[in-house]
Image (cartoon, rainbow, N blue to C red):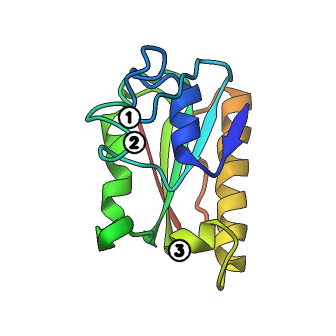
Amino acid sequence: MFMNEKSGTAGFYGGDKYSDAGGNKVGIQGGDSFSAYVAISPQGAGIIFPVDAWEGITKPVLLLTGTRDSELGGVSWEVRTEPFRNMRPGCKWLGVVDGATHMNFAGLGASRRTEARTAQAIGAFLEGVTRGECSPKGRIAGVEVTSK
């Protein structure tokens, strides 16, 4: 199991289609080393990843972003949902934490609520993966979860 706040790292190790070929834009090679992945504040196409970089990941993945998790330059948080949209179905979850900023995920600012909601979402995801159940069970207050 691999969990890292740096979503690029999860992409590299999750087997994005460019990592093993050295085709990501920072030249890091990863591999498919873990049974499930968590990416917090994931990156879409841009500085690090080319278009559709996430489509080859076949393992279970939880991606988490927040409704105030904007990209550099003020681009909307919704761009952080691109990796989820580009992945093939099969135990993929997207969690959107209400009000969470990029810095809240890093533990800065008024982050306690974001930290608690993030921990709940990760716990629910890993519990489901462990049981072989890839659909979210129940609701997590303040987190909208979508799965495919």
Q: Is residue 135 visible?
A: no
Work out how far the residue at label 1 is from the one at label 2, CA to CA, in angstroms: 5 Å
Residue with the mark numbered 3: 100
Residue 106 visible in the current orientation: yes
Q: Amino acid at mark 2?
A: Ile
Q: Secondary structure at mark 3?
A: strand
Is 44 above or below relative to 11? below
Residue drawn at 45 percent across, 35 percent down: 26
* Mark identifier at residue 25: 1
Q: Secondary structure at mark 2?
A: loop
Give the residue at mark 2. 48
Q: Farthest residue in the left direction?
A: 51
83 or 17, which is in the foreground? Answer: 17
Do residues under tags 1 and 2 come within 8 Å of each other at their CB atoms?
Answer: yes
Q: Residue 60: which disc? A: none
Residue 111: quadrant of the picture: bottom right
Which residue is outermost to the bottom? 110
Residue 73's x, y, as percent? Answer: 31, 70
Q: CA–CA distance between discs 2 and 3?
A: 23 Å
Could you say whether the residue bearing mark 1 is in a helix, strand or loop? Answer: loop
Closer to the chain start, of discs 1 and 2, is: 1
**Residue drawn where x is 62% and y is 32% of the image:** 133
Q: Nearer the viewer, residue 18 or 81?
A: 18
Q: Amino acid at mark 1?
A: Lys
Pinpoint residue 87: horizontal percent, then vertical percent: 37, 32
First reached walking from the N terminus: tag 3 or tag 1: 1
Nearer to the camera, 106 or 125: 106
Q: Residue at point 35% right, 27% down?
A: 55
**The N terminus is located in which quarter?**
top right
Q: Which kind of residue does numbered mark 3 sit on?
A: Ala
Q: Disc 3 versus disc 1: distance between alpha carbons?
A: 28 Å
The image shows residue 125, relative to residue 56, as above or below, that is below
